[in-house]
């Protein structure tokens, strides 16, 4: 197909499915398309930084280095980062990304993740990106796993492969929104298993959509480390406030 026809098709698609703001879902102006947010949402959306917990990456007070959980309990993963604060419009955005088939957000989120943590990912010399797996039946019902969509977008941009057949989610764990840290931990016990024993990774980056208490990343990291992985890092699109 020649370039001219490709161009015409691209503009038809754009007319039929205009790019919309990730946060408020309004049609974007041309200059707003790169960031994925309209002008007014771009002002409202809050990134995590500049004051974040040095271990889990959630926002902390100006003179704190670690959040309460990291000060007291610690984690199985080595370090984690999140891009946005899970507040206001970002909650709607994450809902559409998860349930509304807005897989197109994956690239935009990956762009923002790399802008903020590209160097950090490079420094860690990650072998492979592993999205937090979804229970098979659930994935079939929903059609996709949003963590996997984000992982694939990241992979394209940083050139690190994605491995989504290394670890499996054994049960459809109950929704954890209402559970505290201890109950979440219990809920996740034996939730994941390594299913590929013929490969060995040294450094893994686990990716997920929302970081809340870190219990999911912890459990995946624990299973990976039991399986011989040396260092496990986490990267999430949003982090909730505790
Ligand atoms: Zn907007
Ligand atoms: Zn922390």
Image: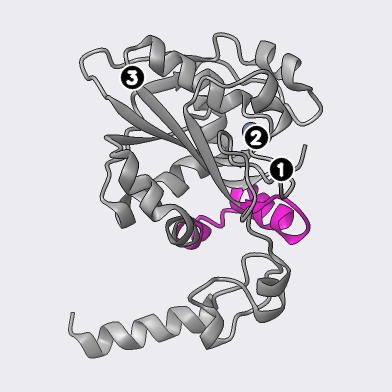
N-term mark: 2 or 1: 2
**Which element is circle 2 on?**
loop
Residue 69 at least partly seen: yes
Residue 229 badge = 3
N-term mark: 1 or 3: 3
- Estimate the spatial distance between the alpha carbons at disc 2 and disc 1, rounded to whole Å: 16 Å
Residue 240 badge = 1
Q: Quadrant of the C terminus?
A: top right
Q: Could you say which is closer to the camera, residue 215 or residue 52?
A: 52
Q: Is residue 167 left or right of residue 39?
A: left
Residue 144 at least partly seen: no
At a point 76% along the width and 53% down the height, the residue shown is 87
For the residue carrying disc 1, how many other residues have a C-alpha within 10 Å: few (<14), some (14-19), or many (20+)? some
Residue 193 badge = none
Name which quarter of the figure residue 142 lies in: top right
At a point 27% along the width and 25% down the height, the residue shown is 202
N-term mark: 3 or 2: 2
What range is drawn magenta here?
Answer: 84-109
Residue that badge 2 annotates: 66
For the residue carrying disc 2, how many other residues have a C-alpha within 10 Å: few (<14), some (14-19), or many (20+)? many
For the residue carrying disc 3, how many other residues have a C-alpha within 10 Å: few (<14), some (14-19), or many (20+)? some
- Estimate the spatial distance between the alpha carbons at disc 1 and disc 3, rounded to whole Å: 27 Å
At a point 76% along the width and 42% down the height, the residue shown is 241
């Amino acid at each position: 197909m020649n370039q001219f026809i490709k161009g015409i098709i691209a503009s038809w698609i754009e007319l039929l499915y205009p790019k919309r703001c990730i946060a408020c879902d309004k049609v974007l102006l041309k200059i707003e398309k790169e960031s994925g947010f309209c002008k007014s949402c771009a002002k409202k959306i809050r990134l995590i930084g500049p004051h974040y917990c040095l271990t889990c990456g959630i926002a902390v007070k100006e003179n704190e280095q670690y959040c309460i959980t990291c000060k007291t309990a610690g984690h199985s993963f080595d370090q984690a980062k999140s891009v946005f604060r899970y507040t206001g419009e970002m909650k709607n955005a994450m809902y559409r990304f998860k349930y509304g088939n807005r897989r197109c957000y994956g690239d935009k989120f990956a762009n923002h993740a790399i802008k903020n943590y590209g160097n950090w990912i490079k420094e860690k010399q990650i072998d492979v990106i592993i999205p937090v797996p979804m229970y098979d039946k659930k994935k079939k019902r929903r059609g996709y796993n949003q963590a996997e969509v984000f992982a694939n977008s990241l992979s394209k941009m940083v050139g690190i492969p994605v491995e989504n057949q290394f670890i499996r989610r054994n049960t459809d764990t109950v929704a954890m929104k209402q559970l505290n840290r201890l109950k979440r931990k219990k809920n996740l016990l034996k939730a994941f298993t390594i299913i590929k024993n013929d490969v060995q990774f040294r450094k893994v980056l686990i990716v997920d959509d929302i970081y809340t208490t870190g219990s999911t990343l912890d459990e995946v990291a624990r299973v990976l480390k039991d399986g011989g992985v040396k260092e496990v890092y986490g990267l999430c699109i949003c982090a909730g406030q505790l």
